[in-house]
Amino acid sequence: MSGKDYYKILGVDKSASPEEIKKTYRKLALKYHPDHNEGNKSAEAKFKDLNEAYAVLRDPEKKQQYDMFGAEGFQNRFSQEDIFRDFDLGSIFREFGFGRGSRGQGSRPFGNGYSSGGFDGFQNRQQRMKGQNLIYELPMNLEELTKPTSKTITYQVNGRQEQVAVKVPAGIKGGQKLRLQGKGQPGPYGGPSGDLYIQIKEIPHPLFRREDADLFLKQKIRFSQAVLGADIEVLTLEKKMLKLKIPAGTQDNAKFRLKNFGLPRYNGSGKGNAYVEINIDVPKELTDEQKELVTSLAQAEL
């Protein structure tokens, strides 16, 4: 977590005066206010960040703490609740001359629908603003995905460590996400918390390759076994040894199916299959006896 650069968000220097900070915030708040950008999620996020930056930089004590600890250090020490404590957005906007108030001719309505209701509607909207979603990458190997698994993870929320139990369904694929509602960053102005997304990171397996619910295993056999046929043993993901009959005349890259020895189908029923991919092993070195035998085979056009 690198922290938010409040000076950059407002576009002011660290040496900016309180009046300059207020003036810049007023201009940007007008530009990115939700009434002027209805349905624009990017503008809404910018508006949230502007309010957070101004809540800190307008307060001499918070600003001093922010300058002392830096962006990351400050956000490790201050929660969203701390940042917005004593920050009355309605009063601030009335101070700027927006909405109904006792500022005489200088007052004017702000946005759509606030001239008759003051800032109550605006503040209610802010309270409904959802907090930021978080993503946690959870590494899992294929063995763990053969059955439902429960994991306890530790993650950071506003610089604090939180723990949560996650139920991972069998057969889920790398890159897919599980949503834990309300476990993300708390919302500004007391709004609902964001969500925590658990993104599965599939650890590559030393033996098996996965395609959806199917598994693929490369198996070397000798030339004589391919020509004459043989019974071999192959290992499954569940560590079971199965006998596989290799018929005479098996070609290189031949594929044999082991039905229902794949992974469970995610959000489906049944299991995938395992496939044994045959590779004929050609030795790099031969004994004298082996060379004579291979020469004989060559002479026999085999």
Image (cartoon, rainbow, N blue to C red):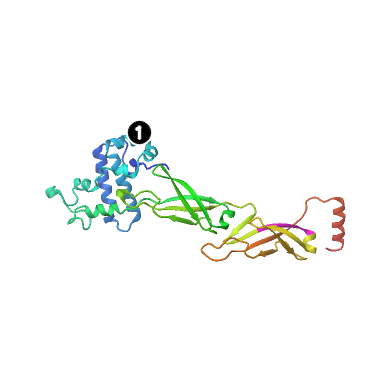
Q: Residue furthest left?
A: 104
Is residue 69 visible in this depiction of the protein? yes
The kind of residue tagged 1 is: Met
Who's the residue at 33% across and 45% down the image? 80
Q: Tell me: 229 left or right of 15.
A: right
x and y, in percent, of residue 24 in the image: 27, 44
| Figure quadrant of the N terminus | top left
Residue lying at 29% horizontally and 44% vertically, measured from the top left: 84
Does 203 sit left or right of 286 as displayed?
Answer: left
> Magenta stretch containing residue 84, yes or no?
no
- The x, y position of residue 135, in whole percent, is 45, 51
* Corner quadrant of residue 244: bottom right
Residue nearest the viewer, comparing 46 with 204? 204
Mark 1 Cα shell of 10 Å, populated few (<14), some (14-19), many (≥20): few
The residue at which mark 1 appears reads as 68
Q: Quadrant of the C terminus?
A: bottom right
Residue 99, x across and y down, in percent: 18, 52
Give whichever of 301, 209 is nearer the camera.
Answer: 209
Q: Is residue 219 magenta?
A: yes
Instruction: Write the residue at 78% across / 60% down.
Output: 225
Can residue 10 be seen here? no
Question: Total of numbered circles in the picture?
Answer: 1
Residue 68 versus residue 246 in the image, above or below: above
Question: Over which residues does the magenta segment extend?
Answer: 217-223
What secondary structure is found at the residue carrying circle 1? helix
Q: Quadrant of residue 223?
A: bottom right
**Residue at screen point 27% across, 45% down:** 25
In percent of width and height, residue 82 lies at 31, 42
SS assignment for the magenta stretch, majority: strand
